[in-house]
Amino acid sequence: MPTKITFIYDNPTDPEAFEAGYADSLTKAKALPGITKVETSKVWPKEDGSETPAYRSVDLYFADYDSASAAVATEEAGALFPSVFELATGGVRILFSDVEEG
């Protein structure tokens, strides 16, 4: 069953600094071995100006759980994860999920 690793970035303390480092972190994510698809999203601002429940998300798709698990144990992951945590000044949640296609 396809598997994805999702990074949900909460609202950063400095959105401009986040955006400045985001492209580099995304490049590192795309370098993980076994990726079949990458999907990124930026949360729409709320119309009333209040804070959104998250800021950005990144989904990294793999053929299966074993491929995803192997990818996070690589040298490329060793370069990726520090950049993820540096960007995540507002917090980050990382999920491994089975992809259920409708």
Image (cartoon, helix red, strand yellow):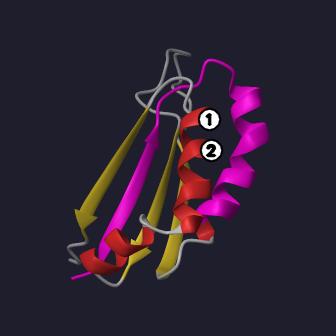
Give whichever of 72, 96 is nearer the camera: 72
- The vertical placement of 68 against 84, above or below, is below
Rendering quarter of residue 62: bottom left
Assign the C terminus to one quadrant of the image.
bottom left
Instruction: Tell me which segment is drawn in magenta.
Output: 1-29
- The vertical placement of 60 against 52, above or below, is below
- The residue carrying mark 2 is 83
Assign the N terminus to one quadrant of the image.
bottom left
- The residue carrying mark 1 is 87
Q: Residue at x 35, y 80 (%)?
A: 67
Crowdedness near tag 1: few (<14), some (14–19) or many (≥20) residues, C-alpha within 10 Å: many
Give whichever of 83, 21 is nearer the camera: 83
Q: Residue at x 58, y 66 (%)?
A: 76
Q: Where does residue 77 sit, x and y in percent of width and height?
A: 53, 61
Q: Where does residue 60 sit, x and y in percent of width and height?
A: 46, 66
Indicate left or right for 44 with 3 as reference: right
> Dot 1: what SS?
helix
* In the image, residue 70 lies in the stretch drawn in magenta: no
The number of callouts visible is 2
Q: Residue 33, which numbered label?
A: none
Rendering quarter of residue 19: top right
Residue type at mark 2: give it.
Ser
State if disc 1 and disc 2 touch (CB < 8 Å).
yes
